[in-house]
Every structure is written in C-alpha cells, then in structure tokens.
C-alpha cells in the first residue's frame, strides 16, 4: 500500500459525490465490471486517482486498490426517463463510504464517485473503460500515465509568464465583474434534498441553433446561447435568479502541451453581465474571463480559502439555513462530448450527472453534447425550488433553445 498527498482542490470536494448515468451501453455483468475497475485501480498507481481512498481528515490518501470499489449492483431495467429519479434516490441514500460505487439498470451504467478523486473528466474516463468492457491488456494508455506535478503553478507560469500583459487584463476584468452583494434577509432552517431533472434535445437542434446564430448572432458560442436560453426559460417559469451566473471552466486549457491532470482542475467564475439571458453579453463575459485567466485566479483563490477554513476546523460545515425568499444562483458546466454508450439507439440515449450543490440556493446545470443534439441536467435541492418548474423550463430549452436569440421561450 502506498499513499499520495492530494491538492487542497481535491480535499475541498471530498464530501461531495458525482453520480452519472450513460447509455444505452452493454457494460457486462456486475462481476465483469468489478474486475475491470479493480484492475484499473491496481495498474496505474495513485497518480491516476483510481485506487485512492478519499478522506476528509488528511490530505494524505491511501492507495488501496482492493478497498477502492464499493458496491456493484444490478438494478431493475429502466428507461432514460426514469434515470433522473433514480439518480436522485441514490444521491439521497448514499453514505459516501466508498470511493466508487457502480450499478447497471438494464442498458444504463450508473457511476457514483467521490468528487474528491476528480471532476467530470475523471468520471467520463471511468465510464468509457467500463462501457467499452476493456480487458486488462486493452486498458487505455492513460491508465499507466504519470500526472503532471504542481499543475496549478505550471499553468500560472505558462499562461502569465508567456505574456505578462495578461495579468493587467486580469485586473481590468476583475474590476469590471465585482462580486454580487448578498442581501441580508429572513431565513429558515434547511436540510439537503438533492434532486435531478433532465431533458434531451432531438432532431438536430444544435444545427437549428447554428442557423439562427448565423442570421442574428454571428460569433456567439453555442454554449452561451444554450445557457442564456436556460436563464430566459427559468424567468418564464417564475424562478428569479441573480444578474450574474457562475460558469465552470476546465483549467486544463491553461497548461502547456503534454500535461496530464487526473484530479480536480476546474473552477467556477462569476460572470456579471447585467443580463445573463442575453447570449451576446454572456458570450463576451465568458470570453473576457477566459482570455484574462480569471479561472486560474479563481482556482488559486479557492485552494487558499479552503486551506484557511480547514485549519480553522470549518471546511466541511454544511449549510443549515436558506433564505425564505430564495434567489437562484445559476451554475453552468458545459462538458462537451462525453462517452454516451456503445449501443446505437438515439431514442434511448442518456448522458449526464447529478452534481449536488453545496449552496442551497444554487442550481447546477450540466450540458453535454451528442452530435447535433445535447443533454442538459439540473442539480438542486427540491425543498428550495420546485422540480416541476425546472423540468418544464429544461423541456422548453431542449425543444427550442434558439428562441433565446429573440428572448422568447414558449411554455
């Protein structure tokens, strides 16, 4: 048995879980899944994260491949429409005692992983290994890979060292995007109630968005249009949100070529654009943040904040109260193309995750692409926001996201 010292960014997420579902996929029997996961955990050593045993008591985590995998269970077969409720039940019943738990429900693969091990990038890697039924001899090359040491320092040096003027741009961008003040008000007692709803677009929706963009919003990213559509749809359903949104950036983009990161390396950046329902404004805000390196600065700040809270003994204190009139804090995570399964059945596809927010007023939207369509999920707490309203809003976005360009979402 060996051990590795993980980063504060990993430790920060050690109490959280990411629960994903993908399919249709022929993942094999539970014993086959258990075998490939254990082989993966034993093969690469602690650097690949597989085999690590997360802890909230220390940053030195054991590498114990035999203890890494918890349960591998076979659930009753279900449809894609059943998966959000299934993931919701698992999130509410999870004890978090194992690094990874796996289940199969008919043609769908469900992975429940400690967020401290890594972000959605790592979950996707595990899904592909299980879903492709890899044998030990055919495990991907990365399973033997050595991760880049001190990635945050290397990213900062690579991005800012190459062009020092970027630091000035960061300071200007920071001044244009002040933190949104939190108004004090009445609050009520609160407990977690993680919930997921989801929607899938069909019929080459993204191609329609591209055509609409060419007519009226040339240069605006698809991600900005879909995110703005969600903002507008929520408003149409009576859900009030802040004038800023939090956008999750994968900071691997700032590393030099050839760098390899298995652990957590994403950060959320508050984008204050006045009206996040305007795709053009949101696009410019995201672009300014990315080009000035704000995600890297946020990553560094988050690490230092966590270390301070950890030393004080309050790093993992849960929220216990919520505003009596909650205002939604929207978080957008565009994960791009992910492993969706090996069985070509578009009508039954599903590829998304429940990523429980720590803030009771947050709603985390995870958007994945699949050809000319997309899947979107919302993770939130159902004792703060009505699931039926958020589900209806997502259905409207999945049907006609291009209507965000005219600021109209049909209910």
Image: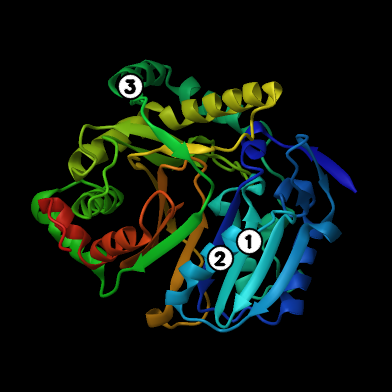
Residue at 78% x, 54% y: name it: 51
Residue 27, image x, y percentages: 63, 78
Above or below: residue 102 compared with residue 169? below
First in residue order: circle 3 vs circle 1? 1
Looking at this rendering, what residue extends furthest in the right direction?
1
Q: Which type of secondary structure does the marked residue at label 2 adopt?
A: helix
Q: Residue at x 83, y 58 (%)?
A: 67
Pinpoint residue 55: horizontal percent, then vertical percent: 75, 42
First along the sequence among labels 3 and 2: 2
Mark 3 or mark 2, which is nearer to you? 2
Q: CA distance from mark 2 to mark 1?
A: 6 Å
Where on the picture, by quarter, is residue 28?
A: bottom right
- Residue 280 in which image quadrant: top left
- In the rendered view, tell whether residue 183 sits above or below residue 195: above
Seen at 15% across and 62% down, the residue is 410
- Residue on which the image places disc 1: 93
Residue that numbered label 2 is attached to:
89
């Amino acid at each position: 048995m060996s051990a590795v010292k993980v980063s504060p960014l990993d430790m920060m997420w050690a109490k959280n879980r990411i629960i994903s579902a993908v399919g249709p996929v022929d993942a094999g029997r539970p014993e086959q899944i258990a075998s490939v996961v254990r082989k993966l955990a034993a093969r690469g050593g602690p650097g690949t994260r597989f085999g690590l045993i997360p802890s909230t008591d220390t940053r030195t985590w054991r590498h114990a491949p035999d203890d890494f995998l918890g349960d591998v269970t076979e659930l009753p077969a279900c449809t894609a429409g059943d998966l959000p409720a299934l993931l919701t039940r698992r999130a509410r019943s999870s004890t978090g005692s194992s690094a990874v738990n796996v289940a199969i429900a008919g043609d769908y693969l469900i992975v429940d992983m400690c967020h401290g091990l890594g972000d959605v990038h790592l979950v996707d890697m595990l899904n592909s290994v299980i879903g492709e039924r890899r044998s030990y001899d055919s495990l991907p090359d990365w399973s033997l890979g050595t991760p880049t040491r001190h990635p945050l320092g290397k990213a900062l040096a690579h991005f800012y060292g190459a062009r020092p003027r970027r630091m000035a741009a960061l300071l200007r961008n920071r001044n244009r995007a002040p933190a949104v003040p939190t108004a004090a008000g009445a609050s009520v007692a609160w407990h977690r109630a993680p919930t997921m709803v989801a929607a899938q677009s069909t019929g080459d929706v993204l191609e329609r968005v591209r055509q609409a963009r060419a007519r009226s919003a040339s240069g605006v990213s698809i991600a900005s249009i879909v995110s703005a559509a969600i903002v507008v749809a929520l408003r149409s359903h009576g859900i009030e949100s802040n004038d800023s949104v939090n956008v999750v950036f994968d900071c691997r983009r700032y590393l030099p070529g050839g760098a390899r990161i298995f652990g957590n390396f994403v950060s959320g950046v508050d984008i204050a654009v006045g009206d996040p329902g305007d795709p053009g404004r949101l696009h410019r805000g995201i672009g300014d943040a990315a080009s000035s390196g704000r995600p890297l600065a946020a990553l560094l700040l988050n690490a230092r904040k966590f270390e301070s809270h950890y030393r004080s003994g309050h790093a993992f204190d849960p929220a216990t109260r919520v505003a009596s009139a909650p205002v939604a804090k929207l978080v957008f995570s565009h994960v791009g193309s992910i492993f969706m399964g090996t069985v070509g059945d578009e009508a039954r596809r599903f590829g998304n995750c429940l990523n429980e927010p720590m803030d009771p007023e947050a709603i985390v939207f995870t958007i994945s692409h699949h050809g000319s369509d997309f899947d979107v999920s919302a993770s939130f707490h159902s004792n703060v926001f009505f699931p039926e309203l958020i589900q209806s809003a997502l259905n409207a976005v999945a049907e006609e996201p291009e209507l965000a360009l005219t600021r109209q979402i049909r209910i």
